[in-house]
Amino acid sequence: MIKLYLKKSYYTTILDHCIKGLPNESCGLLAGTEEDEEITVTKVYLLTNVDASREHFSMDPKEQLAALKDARANGYKIIGNFHSHPESPSRPSEEDKRLAFDPTIEYLILSLMEEGNPVLKAFGIDKEKNVTIHEIEITE
């Protein structure tokens, strides 16, 4: 079972970014390290949702490239991405599944549909678009 380790400060960074982005979806990339089935997030990249939409997102290509270069320069790899669901549960939508091109990364979804009760979940999405929920451990 794949387990994702996320520092509390990174979780707060993601949460703040997604709340500031309301009413639209927010997005970003996660860099880190992977050993066996344990993934550790080492850096969070907050990106712009160029669609400015409540129902879907597209990451700014220039920001994506800058994040990729920064991760490589620091010896990390992009291990996943995240986006928010302002008005729906923390699970991949049909569009999320359709756009999940890389079966080797984590897809994190932060639901903000219940005010004061954000729900962050991590998923694996394989080539056949099957979704597996992965464990997230928030660390100090």
Image (cartoon, helix red, strand yellow):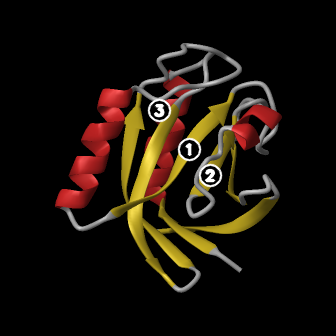
Q: Calculate the distance from the C-alpha at mark 3 to the C-alpha at mark 2.
A: 17 Å
Q: Quadrant of residue 135?
A: bottom right
Which quarter of the rendering shows the N terminus? Answer: bottom right
* Outermost bottom residue: 36
Looking at the rendered structure, the secondary structure element under dot 1 is strand
Are circles 2 and 1 on residues that touch, CB within 8 Å?
A: yes
Q: Identify the residue under disc 2.
A: 107
Residue lying at 24% horizontally and 59% vertically, measured from the top left = 72
Can residue 117 be seen?
no
Mark 3 vs 1, N-terminal side: 3
Residue lying at 66% horizontally and 44% vertically, measured from the top left = 109
Instruction: Please rate how many residues cluster around mark 2, counting C-alpha atoms within 10 Å: few if below 14, some from 14 to 19, many from 20.
Output: many
Instruction: Please rate how many residues cluster around mark 3, counting C-alpha atoms within 10 Å: few if below 14, some from 14 to 19, many from 20.
Output: many
Mark 3 vs 2, N-terminal side: 3
* Outermost front residue: 127
Single out the mark in the foreground, 3 or 1: 1
Report the amino acid beneath label 1.
Phe
Report the amino acid beneath label 2.
Tyr
Q: Identify the residue under disc 3.
A: 17
Mark 2 vs 1, N-terminal side: 1
Give percent across and percent down for residue 61: 37, 29
Residue lying at 46% horizontally and 39% vertically, measured from the top left = 28
Q: Identify the residue under disc 1.
A: 82
Q: Quadrant of residue 84?
A: top right
